Amino acid sequence: MGEVASGKRLLALAAGFVIWSVAFVVLYSALSIGCRQGWSDVHLLAGLSLQRVQLVALYVLHLLAGLGLVVFLRRSQFTSGAAAFLQTVAFYAAIAAVFSTAFTFAGTLMLTPC
Amino acid sequence: MDQPSPSSPIKLHHDLQAIWDTKPGWGRLSAVNHTVLGKRFIIAAFVFFAIGGVLAMLIRAQLATPRSAFVGPDIYNQLFTMHGTVMMFLFAIPMFEGFAIYLLPKMLGARDMAFPRLTAYGFWCYVFGGSILIAALLLGVAPDSGWFMYTPLSSSTYSPGINADIWLLGITFVEISALSAAIEITVSILKLRAPGMSIDRLPIMAWYLLVTALMMLFGFPPLILGSILLELERAFDLPFFDPVRGGDSLLWQHLFWLFGHPEVYIIFLPAAGAISMMIPTFARHPLVGYRAIIAAIIAVGFLSFGLWVHHMFAIGIPHLALAFFSAASGLVAIPTGLQIFAWIATLASGRPRFDVPMLYLAGFFVIFVIGGLTGVMLAMVPFNLQAHDTHFVVAHLHYVLVGGFVFPMLAAAYYWLPHITGRVSDHKLSVPAFWLIFGGFNMTFFLMHLTGLLGMPRRIASYPPEAKWEWLNLLSSVGSFLMAIGFALFVVDIILQVRFGKAFRRNPWGARSLEWATPTPPPAYAFASLPRVQSRADWLDPEDHAVKLAAGRGYLGFARYGWMETLGVGMIEGEPDQVIVLPKPTILPLWTGLATGAIVLCLLFKAYWLALLPLAITVTLLLSWTRTTGAQSDLGPLPIGHGQSAAVHWEAERPPSWWAMVFTLGADATFFASLLFGCVFLALIAPAWPPPVVVSPSYGLLALAALLMIAAAIYGRLALRDLARTRSPSAWLGLCALSHAGVCAVVAAVIASDIPDPTLHAHHATLFAILGYAFLHSGVGCILALYGVQRQRHGKLSALRSLDLRIGSLWHDYAAVAGVVALLAVVALCWSVGGRP
């Protein structure tokens, strides 16, 4: 296996939590910008504000991305050796990351944004 | 090429010793060996720990009684600032570095770290930087704004003296050591291992250190950026943190805690790695949950970067954002708890044997769990607002840091000291020392929870008797002196062991990891030959390996050309793919450290133009390190033993130095991202915006700079292409250097014409900083391109020996991408405040 391919396989260990990190940066930025721009006062349908809609959409998007990674890692076919080991650890980490994403940003569903 | 003929074990030992040993006398200053430097780091860190401990005693003497006249508030401010600074930057991080540098190669089955001269340079930077801080303390001009140096208290308006500059410059100097260690640890774990040690066979300690080192690479740049920006404000009045001119003191808090909270885990994780090595030895059972623990370490590594605002809950940010940080702060307890349960499960599954290291680990369990629980309490916003800035927080952080680092390190000292000294202790003093430290610690800090809940704030030099805190404080102070007596007993015990301990043959604890397969104390080359690992490297048979390796029956069981050799392996499979030739002892790292120290001193005493001289000397010295590297002819594959061969590292596809550049650029990109974050933060959040005068940059010049940056990267690649076709790359490299020089000239022109006064407003200061970043990267790119020309002239380059140009090309590519992003950021920031042409 080439060194660059090895590097990519090692990066899979971090993939789940990279999604969590991106979610953190995106949601925190979107929240700050939305509060600054007054999106909480822009009401869309059913009493939902623009701020709430965009935050929930971003939250769900990152959850789906994390779940997609979990499914992908589950389906990867390595039976033994270092590759299987990396896949297992990456799978565990991805599950932990999905749980972390769901828990950390659950406040977007019900808390006052600004 | 034929393999050197095998020799007798004794001759092999003498041959390797002649090659690897550090010379006595003044030759000691040229040491680059990991065993020597690891011990020096540990000893220096312990000296700083003792200094920090004395400062703590002075703090407790002051707080023992109300209205104390022991020291005045000015001195007291220096005492608590220096106590925190010394313990965090001069003790904890360097102690872990020394521990890693000493043990890691031996645990991995290598003969040294990947970059021995960098280890030495890091050590000198650490010692010189620490000495500047301690000298300032003795002269009464130590930093006095708290170890986290909050602005505006640390800005020149409220701290006009040299005190804060000493912190900003001294700590940045020490950080060079931390970053160099982080790169070295990362590359060493990924590349310098025994053959057969695939990624799934790494000792668990290596996983802990790998994650820790990566956290340092991404955690330290925000602090370095913050320190540079604050020093620029103090020295040149660039208003990054001045709210009157569009700055914001909260930017400092964000940058500091972006580093500061991961720092807690950077300190804890290596200690947890040591625990994970010791517990299986004493439980006589392999570590339970190896894979789950690795996933937990990764989780801790990431989650720790999402907690920083829990130090800032009281500053007034949106509630939803508080909820993000509060949730992440609570969440990190889960992977940490998983590790604790794995250690308990290991003990429960085995046949535990109780000995002195286990006593100290029991102390760790009790104290760290209490600290973790109060951490979860503080993660909850309502409680945090009540306890904010009180002694409850002081109690919590000491339970976490002393429990999570000092107790495991004391256990580790007793566990690995026989390896370092070749002697075992009779442990007569270690048990009373433990009880004094454990009892004294709890007496000191448990009571601080109560004074904190009674409302006692942090960092006050005195308190009135009517506050009703005096008995608790007096008992705390008594406890702290008991603890100090315990540490003194520990030191005496260590000295007695080193001096009078009984010699033993090997592996007194029955450990199952490779470091115990070296002779004890270990020779400079660690292993006479390198092992082949066929099972997990923290559960193998060191005795069996030791005999074979000492007889030269492993890999590289010979001395060749007087080279210091070790093996590089594929990162995942662990099969050998290169022979790494390490540099010989040299005094260059010391001279380079001294020159770097001279830069710091020039800046400290505001001799800014004079600083250019030691800067030039430092760059020249760093370049001169490469004079002895590489070869003037192609060598092809070299025999490594067992019928196998591998390329020498400068002819290999991906040698350690290539990976080091990749990780360096990763840290650099984090620095740049932090800078962009700061610029956006100020434009979006800070008061006094928009600026009174908006910059309308010269778009033509910016476009020209972008084109030159891209051209430099292309020329760098064309040079590589020509080298691969056995043509001279010098012409392309010359064009590359010219393009970089052109970028510097154009960017300087933009700064001079468009930002004549960067002190006017944070808008101007941030544009100045971004353009300065681009300027600096092209400046370095120019030096690297000219260095390539020089290497070609000296015959060090060929199609096979293209490493120097490949490393340079990585830099040119990064400089182009980051430079273009920087120029786009300048345009966007100007547009955001109406600065159009």
Image: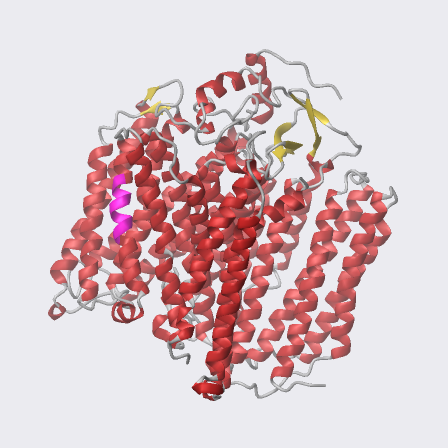
Horizontal relation, residue B533 to residue B792: left or right: left
Horizontal relation, residue B696 to residue B191: left or right: right
- How many numbered discs sit on the rendered protein? 0
- Along the line of sight, which residue is nearer the eye, B338 or B728? B338
Horizontal relation, residue B367 to residue B833: left or right: left
Residue B78 seen in render: yes
Which secondary structure is most common in the magenta stretch? helix
Residue B658 seen in render: no
Above or below, B818 against B238 in this view is above
The image quadrant of residue B770 is bottom right
- Along the line of sight, which residue is nearer the eye, B108 or B244? B108
Q: Position of residue B127 (x, y in %)?
A: 47, 46
The residue under the point 54% across, 29% down is B22
Q: Position of residue B442 (x, y in %)?
A: 20, 49
Above or below, A47 against B791 in this view is below
The residue under the point 67% across, 14% down is B5
Above or below, B495 against B731 in this view is above
Give the quarter of the figure containing the N terminus of chain B.
top right
The residue under the point 30% across, 40% down is B344
Q: Position of residue B718 (x, y in %)?
A: 83, 53
B319 in the magenta segment: no
Q: Which residues are magenta?
A: B362-370
Q: Position of residue B240 (x, y in %)?
A: 51, 74
Give the quarter of the figure containing the C terminus of chain B.
bottom right
The image quadrant of residue B386 is bottom left
Horizontal relation, residue B671 to residue B725: left or right: left
